[in-house]
Image (cartoon, helix red, strand yellow):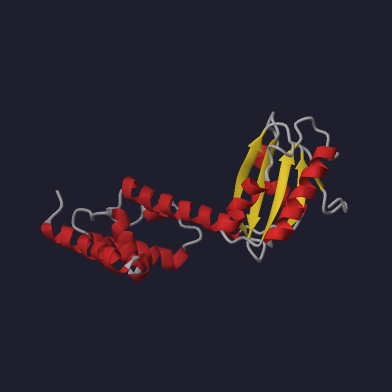
């Protein structure tokens, strides 16, 4: 059972978060909220400061074993910290991904290489070509009626993106763009010009390779 003192120490960072926002909190206060409570003989603030000291000493290689070296810190609380760090890293990496080539597009869409159906996707980029988001537009055989400019550009407008790259897989393994592929590309490029959102490329890919319409002067 938590003591009154433990509850008060935890409530102070939480109250500060509610009243002033997360950015107002010190590192150890954020950790204290994440932990929720201290351990026997060590209140949550003291425990949090010890964890922050580990962050400062060697954050990049911090793992579960190193956290467990803190006296009294159990597997459950150490796991909470490691999970929060890993989740943050994944989203920071995702937000900082930059597209510089068709190969980058191919790597970004690796989850779709072995799909049995065609997936038409759009990668939304900011002014520095960092990925804002990646969305599936349609699933099925590509045609102009399915790939409507409204569906493609709506997220770009909403997120104030500077440009887009579209891509789709060819389950057949044939990389050559079809007439329909070219028609869809032309329609989206024209729509992008009207909206002020550039279509940078249309990448066709299979499980083994990719084809860039932009690199091959087909846009």
| Residue positioned most to the right | 217
> Is residue 170 visible in the rendered structure shown here?
yes
Q: Residue at x 78, y 38 (%)?
A: 208
Q: Residue at x 67, y 62 (%)?
A: 129
- Closest to the observer: 85 or 59? 85
28 vs 134: above or below:
below
> Is residue 178 visible in the rendered structure shown here?
no
Q: Position of residue 215 (x, y in %)?
A: 84, 54
85 vs 168: above or below:
below
Q: Residue at x 36, y 52 (%)?
A: 68
- Closest to the observer: 190 or 201? 190
- Closest to the observer: 192 or 174? 192
| Residue positioned most to the left | 4
Q: Position of residue 47 (x, y in %)?
A: 28, 60
Q: How many marks?
A: 0
Q: Position of residue 151 (x, y in %)?
A: 62, 46
Classify residue 171 as left or right of residue 73: right
Q: Position of residue 117 (x, y in %)?
A: 69, 30
Classify residue 79 as left or right of residue 19: right
Residue 118 occupies quadrant:
top right
Residue 9 occupies quadrant:
bottom left
Q: Residue at x 38, y 48 (%)?
A: 79
């Amino acid at each position: 059972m938590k003591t009154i003192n433990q509850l008060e120490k935890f409530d102070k960072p939480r109250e500060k978060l509610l009243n002033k926002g997360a950015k107002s909190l010190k590192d150890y206060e954020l950790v204290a909220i994440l932990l929720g409570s201290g351990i026997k003989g060590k209140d949550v603030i003291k425990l949090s400061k010890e964890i922050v000291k580990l962050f400062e000493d060697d954050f990049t290689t911090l793992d579960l074993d190193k956290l467990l070296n803190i006296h009294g810190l159990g597997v459950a609380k150490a796991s909470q910290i490691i999970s929060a760090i890993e989740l943050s890293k994944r989203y920071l990496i995702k937000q900082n991904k930059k597209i510089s080539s068709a190969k980058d597009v191919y790597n970004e869409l690796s989850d779709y290489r072995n799909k049995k159906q065609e997936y038409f996707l759009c990668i939304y980029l900011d002014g520095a070509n960092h990925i804002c988001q990646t969305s599936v537009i349609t699933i099925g055989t590509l045609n102009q009626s399915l790939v409507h400019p409204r569906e493609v550009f709506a997220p770009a407008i909403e997120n104030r993106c500077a440009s887009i790259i579209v891509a789709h897989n060819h389950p057949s393994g044939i990389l050559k763009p079809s007439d329909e592929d070219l028609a869809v590309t032309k329609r989206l490029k024209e729509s992008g010009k009207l909206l002020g959102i550039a279509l940078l490329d249309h990448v066709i890919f299979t499980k083994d390779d990719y084809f860039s319409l932009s690199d091959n002067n087909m846009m």
